[in-house]
Amino acid sequence: MIVRFLPFPSSHHWNYYSKFHLPNPNKPPIKFKSKCFLNPTHILSSSSSSSSPRVFVISDLHTDYSENMSWINSLSTHQYQKDVLLVPGDVAETYNNFISTMSLLKHRFQHVFYVPGNHDLWCRHHPDNTYTDSIEKMYQLLDACKRLGIKTSPEIIDGIGIIPLFSWYHESFDTEKDITSIRIPSLEMACKDFHACKWPRELSSRDLSLALYFDAMNEEIYEQIKEIQSVCRQIISFSHFLPRQELCPEKRMLFYPNLPKIIGSNYLENRIRSIHGDFGSKSACHLFGHTHFCWDAVLDGIRYVQAPLAYPKERKRRMNGGENWLPFCIYANGGLTGKEKGKEPKTDIHTLLYYLKRRRRRQQQQQQQQQGTSS
Ligand SMILES: [Fe+2]
């Protein structure tokens, strides 16, 4: 996720929308490029004769930073040869860096899965108009993945169902009361997506249309998901964006308090619940990225994890635990990691201690109300 403060623009940029607009029914419907999905491929890993493969995750690689590309290059070329890597978006802004990164990863892991993030769809630095818009760029990236052997649709690897989910954020995802005591830059000023992404005229960042468009892409994998649900005891889904606001710190703790308006999708959470169930299960797991906050939490029976490489300066500040624990192993020895009974979680994720020590105000208020009612 990139949230930078741009120089203050002219005053009309401050007049950003405060309410949400439904997609215009008069606009022609956007057409999806059909990927002709059938049933999910069942793949037996080369490790199947001895043990099930491990599943790793790392998001937000941002290899346009040379330090990050070097980090990827320094990953072992033999340690993960039987393993699976899930990449929940934001690999690189430029096409060449994207290809280089994914090639390096495919050389190191047996299976690599990917879903696009917002940075991947930026159309800057392409002066020859390589892409009509960000949608066209996305399909070029997906085509490139296919050529490289990177997976972008559901598959079953040694009995583990892996489900990539497409998504985009919408402002109404944010239900926390706005902070009004300080002047906060508009979304256009703080978020480069509003300048670097190019959308067909039917799609906009300021209504639900983008979130609906990307969510509808998941309709194409409906049959594959049903097949995975019927045969897999372990399912891991992943997306770039956040499915729940609880997976981001409260506004009072954020450098940019309006961040929740540009990070998540309610439609995504609905998809995840349709996969893992309303109450989840012991094996239910969803991975995400985008905000660069390390996260590992169980909400309503689903384990949600973020493990970002993030920007070099963020790693130097160790705001996300540095880089020595990445890529993060989420599945090994036939189960999710950090779930062994009687043992401390094995995860190296630096959870937000401040957040853990201080429950959300809403939770505190609810608890106080309940205590008041019962006393
Ligand atoms: Fe992102």
Image (cartoon, rainbow, N blue to C red):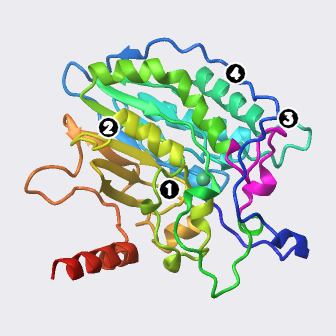
Of labels 1 and 3, earlier in sequence is 3
Tag 1 residue: 309
Mark 1: amino acid: Leu
The CA span between labels 1 and 3 is: 30 Å
- Which tag is nearer the camera, tag 2 or tag 1? 2
Residue 181, relative to residue 285: is it above or below? below
Mark 4: amino acid: Lys
Quarter of the image where the C terminus is located: bottom left
Residue 231: percent from the left, percent from the top? 27, 19
Q: Is residue 261 magenta-colored?
A: no
Residue drawn where x is 82% and y is 49% of the image: 124
Label 3 SS: loop
The CA span between labels 2 and 1 is: 30 Å
Q: Which residues are magenta?
A: 191-209
Label 2 SS: loop
Report crowding for label 4: few under 14, some 14 to 19, many 20 or more residues within 10 A (C-alpha): few
Report crowding for label 1: few under 14, some 14 to 19, many 20 or more residues within 10 A (C-alpha): many
Residue 375, relative to residue 162: is it above or below? below
Q: Is mark 1 within 8 Å of ligand 1?
A: no
Q: Is residue 312 left or right of residue 192?
A: left
Residue drawn where x is 20% and y is 27% of the image: 51
Q: Which mark is residue 103?
A: none
The CA span between labels 4 and 3 is: 15 Å
Tag 2 residue: 277
Label 4 SS: loop
Q: Is residue 78 visible?
A: no
